[in-house]
Amino acid sequence: MQLNTVIFDIDGLLIDSEPLWQEAAAEVFEAYNIKLTNEQYISTTGLRTKEYVQWWFGVYKIDDDEISKAEEKIIEVVLKKIKNKPIILPGVSYIFDFFYKKNFKIGLATSSPQALIDLVIELLQLEKYVSATASAEDLEFGKPNPQVYLNCAEKLNASPFECICFEDSFNGMIAAKAARMKCVVVPHHAQLKEERWGAADLKLSSLQNFGELLFNLVNG
């Protein structure tokens, strides 16, 4: 089956928001006397904010009643940070134009809340490209569960077998493959050589490196 739909993750792929999420979490966690190492933070990258907070509050024995408060505060802080300092990653305009010219249906599927999706569409001026979005915020399970990708494909009226996804996280890659979609990973440069990306259909160092030859390779 030929590809006709592309679905993009957001955090760490389109915008360099992971450091901002880390900053926001550190600021909020400080009130609970939680200080994570960089390695600890990376170990839960790709989880939804709720899951991330739940995990570390469990580790540090913080009352469950505080989870939703901390989650809301982290999201509030990170939205402000992204709005004030949006760092668009290389190749974003190029990759959207590439698929737009091919008349692909284009969607966004993320673990982040809808408010962040809407903000990114506005900041990156993606209104003319994006036909559907899906957030895992209120789903029973987030990535690596494939549901957010399946929901996005359904909104685009596309079969999973017609979809190619772009991801930067391991959980995202597993979600896309579990949805039976093609997956191109663009990991953070520090993780680029890790063997775990072997499950992807293609690995790139930048969105700018994707072109007609690689598209034909994945679409073959």
Image (cartoon, rainbow, N blue to C red):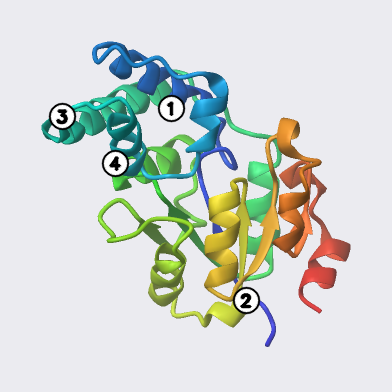
Residue identifier under label 4: 50
Report crowding for label 1: few under 14, some 14 to 19, many 20 or more residues within 10 A (C-alpha). many
x then y, percent, for residue 199:
71, 62
Q: Earlier in the sequence, mark 1 or mark 3?
A: 1
Q: Quadrant of the C terminus?
A: bottom right
Distance from Cα at disc 3 to Cα at disc 2: 47 Å
Badge 3 is on which residue?
63
Q: Is residue 139 found left or right of 159 in the rendered image? A: left
The label nearer to you, 2 versus 1, is 1
| In the image, farthest residue toward the left | 65
Q: Could you classify mark 3 by the number of other residues whose Cα lies within 10 Å: few (under 14), some (14-19), or many (20 or more)? A: few
Marks 1 and 4 close (CB-CB < 8 Å): no
Q: Residue at x 69, y 83 (%)?
A: 2
Q: Count neighbours of disc 4 (C-alpha within 10 A) and say few if under 14, some if 14 to 19, many if 20 or more.
A: some
Disc 4/disc 2 C-alpha distance (Å): 33 Å
110 or 126: nearer the eye? 110
Mark nearest the camera among 4 and 3 is 3
| Residue 21 against residue 31 in the figure, above or below | below
Q: Which structural element holds mark 1?
A: helix
- Residue at the disc numbered 1: 21
Distance (Cα) linking label 1 and label 3: 22 Å
Mark 2 or mark 4, which is nearer the start of the sequence?
2
